[in-house]
Image: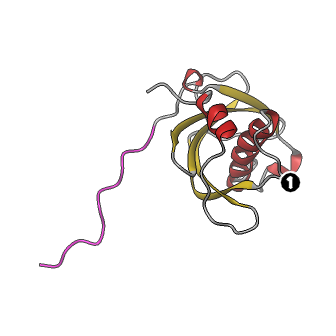
């Protein structure tokens, strides 16, 4: 008998609650974010993830996008969608850190309609920090590691 090529479907995640996240960033939607179906296109959600993480890093003074020796590259990302978002809503991006490695960080994010208790979408991405000039993994700078501790989720 031939082995099955399909595996059981993973259990569908449930929308996380607002209280599961450490910090938030308000992001206004734009007219161009909507697609022909009348809601925000899925690719925009990843842009909001990137915006929430990188803006927080810049504001904390641990990411210099123009001259820093170390930069974070996204090596893995995922998003689960629960409810549509659409222009002219304001989105509130929740951010937390769930794993800090030697040269990598796993961020988890959730996107909420303004004031909503449950996320419209949630996901994660992993940054691997590399040298700007050689693109080789580097240990996380101590200042960055300390800042990331502030975002660590209590599990």
The local crowd at label 1, few if under 14, some if 14 to 19, many if 20 or more residues have their Cα within 10 Å, is: few
The residue singled out by tag 1 in the image is: 67
Residue at left 79%, top 50%?
34
Residue at left 51%, top 46%?
101
Give yes or no for residue 6 being in the magenta stretch. yes
Q: Give the main secondary structure of the magenta stretch.
A: loop
Q: Quadrant of the N terminus?
A: bottom left
- Judge from the rendering whether residue 137 lies leftward or rightward of residue 48; answer left or right: left
Q: Up-down: is 114 above or below 82?
A: above
Query: 38 or 136, which lies in front?
Result: 136
How far from the left and from the top, in percent, is residue 64?
Answer: 82, 47
Res 134 → quadrant: bottom right
How far from the left and from the top, in percent, is residue 59?
Answer: 81, 34
Residue at left 57%, top 46%?
105
Res 5 → quadrant: bottom left
How far from the left and from the top, in percent, is residue 49?
Answer: 69, 45
Query: 78 or 149, which lies in front?
Result: 149
Do we see residue 153 in this rendering? yes
- Judge from the rendering whether residue 103 lies leftward or rightward of residue 25; answer left or right: left
What span is in magenta?
A: 1-13
Q: Quadrant of the C terminus?
A: top left
Give yes or no for residue 16 being in the magenta stretch. no
The number of discs equals: 1
Res 70 → quadrant: bottom right
Do we see residue 80 in this rendering? no
- Element class at badge 1: loop
Q: Up-down: is 32 above or below 88?
A: below
What kind of colouring is applied to the model shown?
secondary structure
How far from the left and from the top, in percent, is residue 12?
Answer: 42, 44
- Judge from the rendering whether residue 113 lies leftward or rightward of residue 105; answer left or right: right
């Amino acid at each position: 008998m031939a082995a099955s090529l399909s595996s059981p479907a993973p259990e569908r995640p449930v929308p996380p609650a607002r209280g599961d996240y450490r910090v938030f960033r308000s992001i206004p939607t734009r007219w161009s974010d909507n697609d022909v179906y009348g809601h925000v296109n899925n690719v925009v959600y990843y842009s909001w993830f990137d915006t929430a993480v990188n803006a927080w890093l810049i504001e904390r003074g641990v990411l210099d996008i123009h001259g820093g020796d170390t930069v974070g590259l996204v090596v893995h990302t995922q998003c689960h969608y629960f409810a549509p978002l659409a222009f002219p809503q304001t989105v509130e991006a929740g951010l937390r850190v769930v794993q800090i490695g030697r040269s990598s960080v796993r961020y988890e994010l959730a996107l909420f309609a303004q004031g909503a208790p449950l996320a419209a979408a949630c996901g994660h991405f992993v940054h691997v920090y590399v040298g700007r000039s050689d693109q080789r993994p580097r240990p996380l700078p101590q200042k960055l590691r300390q800042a990331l501790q502030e975002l660590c989720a209590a599990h």
